Amino acid sequence: MTAHTELEELRRLVDATAHAVDRGDEGAGDAADLAARRWALQQRLDTGIPVDPAELLPRLQEGVSGVHAAETRALDVLRDAVAK
């Protein structure tokens, strides 16, 4: 989940550009168009990310905490497997 629609669009353009490039010569026109759109969006975002820090930071903390919990559980499983 992304915090802002422009960031979602940037992610979509990055993925679509990669897919077009993977198609080689057949996707060259699409890749150029997508890259130009992505560049324009990146320039707009460079002036300031349109996300309220009060919204972003708690979500970031939640995500990092979730990763930490998952890694801790995985380490416990690994320790149990090695101990057997």
Image (cartoon, rainbow, N blue to C red):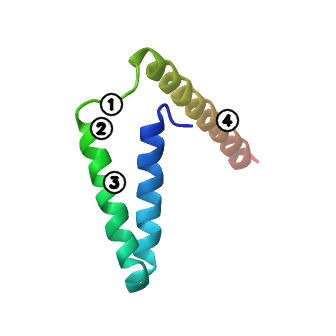
Which amino acid, by three-letter code, is at mark 3? Arg
Q: Secondary structure at mark 2?
A: helix
Q: Secondary structure at mark 3?
A: helix
Q: Which residue is mark 3?
A: 38
Q: Position of residue 24 (x, y in %)?
A: 40, 82
Q: Which residue is mark 4?
A: 73
Numbered badge on residue 49? 1
Give me the residue at 52% from left, 24% from top: 59
Image marks 2 and 1: residues in contact by CB distance under 8 Å: yes
Which amino acid, by three-letter code, is at mark 4? Arg
Placement of 30 over or under 73, stated as above or below: below
The Cα atoms of the two marked residues, 2 and 4, are separated by 37 Å
Q: Position of residue 44 (x, y in %)?
A: 27, 39
Q: Which residue is mark 2?
A: 45
Which amino acid, by three-letter code, is at mark 1? Ile
Image marks 3 and 2: residues in contact by CB distance under 8 Å: no
**Mark 2 or mark 4, which is nearer to you?**
2
Lower position in the chain sequence, tag 1 or tag 4: 1
Give neighbour class at mark 2: few <14, some 14-19, many 20+ (Cα, 10 Å).
Answer: some
Lower position in the chain sequence, tag 3 or tag 4: 3
Name the image quarter holding residue 63. top right
Give me the residue at 48% from left, 26% from top: 60
The Cα atoms of the two marked residues, 1 and 4, are separated by 34 Å
Image marks 2 and 4: residues in contact by CB distance under 8 Å: no
Q: Secondary structure at mark 4?
A: helix
Name the image quarter holding residue 68. top right
**Mark 3 or mark 4, which is nearer to you?**
3
Looking at the image, which is closer to me, 56 or 32? 32
